[in-house]
Amino acid sequence: MRPKEIVVVSGKGGTGKTLITALLASASETKVICDCDVEAANLHLLLKPEEVSSQRVRLGMVARVDTGACKGCGRCWKTCRFSAIEERNSRAYVIPELCEGCGVCALVCPRPAIEMVEEETGDVLFGQSEWGEILYAELLPGRGSSGRLVSELKGRARKRAMALGCSWLLVDGPPGLGCPVISAVSGADVVVLVVEASLSGISDAQRLLPLLRRFDVDILGVANKCGISEDLDRQLEGWLEEESIPLVVKIPFSPDIARLYGNAIPPKDLVDISALANRIQ
């Protein structure tokens, strides 16, 4: 049976996505947990998995120049729109950090002296925590394949959840609204939109919503750090109501929650998310 996919997103970092994901992890007996923030994964810091294993994956392509065959005609560096090839000693030189792997340079090279080779993208990690099996990934510095790595990671988590017969695949989504978010939300059944009660939190959630609307997915709202400003609380709730997004959980700003969270302890006794878990069920 296909597990229900729940993806927690926000539009910005620091809103409480990982907090909500960790708390939801305690609400289902059978689930696989996946942290899709491949550039700064931190869910494992809360769930503290043991027996972690890793696997290096190659998902991107990068151009490689055969300097012996290259005659320095210049077609490649004149064609590359990413400025990833430059002339050095009358030969083409690839700057790997800038190469997007599009392959145009290999197409225009008359020799040919350029080939596209697989590039190491990052590491996929597996571990077993008290609250379930967790998968996460670490993108290698300078790599531009974060969306592909998220897709690979989530695909593996989905297969694992199906093999175990889990009822949930619980995903801690990446911040922002770029390719990693698109990869994380693709195939989801439920999206939990965590909105911080601040100007930036509301603004970024508003920017993210049109993207989420493009997917056939139920959207549930969680308001975090409420109570600091009544005006912002009303603005947040009014926007969710206007967009027909159910506000399922309101979490007040609390130094006690922040203290536990800062010490990598999920504050499950201070935050009641049973209404959210029941809604997802």
Image (cartoon, rainbow, N blue to C red):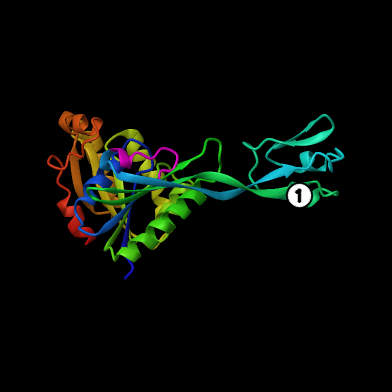
Query: What type of secondary structure mainly makes up the magenta span?
Result: loop
Q: Which residues are magenta?
A: 35-45
**Is 257 a magenta residue?**
no
Q: Nearer the viewer, residue 90 or 273?
A: 90
Query: Residue 72 appears in which quarter of the rendering?
Result: top right
Q: Residue furthest left?
A: 269
Q: Position of residue 143 (x, y in %)?
A: 55, 40
Query: Residue 197 appears in which quarter of the rendering?
Result: top left
Count up the numbered dots: 1
The quadrant the C terminus occupies is bottom left
Residue 133 appears in the picture as rendered: yes
Secondary element type, mark 1: helix
Identify the residue at image location x=75%, y=35%.
93
**Is 36 a magenta residue?**
yes
Q: Nearer the viewer, residue 181 or 160?
A: 160
Residue 42 lies left or right of residue 122; in this view the side is left
Q: Position of residue 17 (x, y in %)?
A: 30, 43
Residue 188 appears in the picture as rendered: no
Q: Position of residue 218 (x, y in %)?
A: 31, 60
* Amino acid type at image mark 1: Ala
Identify the residue at image location x=45%, y=50%.
150
Query: Residue 97 appears in which quarter of the rendering?
Result: top right
> Which residue is disc 1 drawn over?
106
The quadrant the N terminus occupies is bottom left
Task: Note whether 156 is above or below 67 in the view shown.
Answer: below
Q: Nearer the viewer, residue 39 or 80?
A: 39
Residue 13 lies left or right of residue 48; in this view the side is right
Identify the residue at image location x=29%, y=34%.
198
